[in-house]
Image (cartoon, helix red, strand yellow):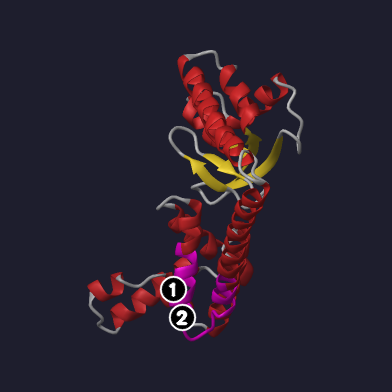
Amino acid sequence: MNNLTVIENELVPVYETSTGEKVVYGSELHEVLGVRTPYKDWSTRRLNDIDAVENEDFEAAQICAPSGQTKKDHIIKLDIAKEMAMLERNDKGKEVRRYFIRVEKKYKSASLATQELSPQLQVMINLEIEQKRQAEKIEHVEEQIESIREVVAIDTTSWRDDTGRILRKIGMECGDSKSYQDVRAESYQLLAKRMGVNVKQRLTNKRRRMADEGVCKSKRDKLNYLDVIADDKKLIEGYTAIVKELAIKYGVA
């Protein structure tokens, strides 16, 4: 169930797969239903309640949480999601179920309307739809290639701007303004672990040296860990390698 496209977003986002299947993300359904039970426990119980079959009625998935960590999720077929909503046995569950029914009717009607056309027109419409899907796939691949080029292009001359741009991109991918700081902190932690360097202490020492040289406090306060890394060629090389790894880890390369 790859290449999902949002087709409805009135209540719970409904997606369409490349084969025309209508699906939802389990975590998004869980959030709209307002279930207090943690998603992992709730999804396991509900999928078992309706005897849903993995890789037939749903697929396991991974999403990037605001903290930057990956979390377990599911891509669930619409008819299964409708049953899960019904099992909540409350007003919100009924509302979501009715919403799913409307979505099903809408796209079923569109499908029936197409079937009433002549075979030649059906072929033309299906061909146009397939061409659109192929174009979307090509665009997606081109975006991935561009992201890979961006990561590979990091060098030791423009490394500050390049690494900052990639870390911000990871933060945006994770969907939370704080996650950029989390990923930046992770990059420094990995640097300390891999290179065996105490960046915080080096920053303190650098500020002290500048104070001894008569540099004003406001200028000293503007220093950060990147200024420490910039003083050591090996740290620059190590840090850029770490950011490239994070780009791959979080799927932006």
Query: Residue 43 falls in which quadrant of the image?
Result: top right
Magenta residue span: 146-168
Identify the residue at image location x=64%, y=39%: 115
Using the numbered discs, state the Cα–Cα distance from disc 2 to disc 1 in whole angstroms. Answer: 6 Å
Contact between labelled residues 1 and 2, with CB atoms less than 8 Å apart: yes
Residue beneath disc 2: 230
Q: Is residue 110 visible?
A: yes
Give how far across and how far down residue 246 sits, in percent.
59, 63
Q: Where residue 60 sits in the image (x, y, percent)?
A: 69, 40
Q: Residue at x 35, y 80 (%)?
A: 209
Nearer the observer, 240 or 130: 130
Regarding mark 2 in the picture, which secondary structure is present there?
helix
Amino acid at pointer 2: Ala
Dominant secondary structure, magenta: helix
Residue 165: give x, y in percent of width and height. Answer: 45, 70
At label 1, the amino acid type is Leu
Q: Is residue 25 left or right of residue 181?
A: right
Residue 159: within the magenta? Answer: yes
Image spot of residue 13 (x, y percent): 50, 38
The residue that label 1 is drawn on is: 226
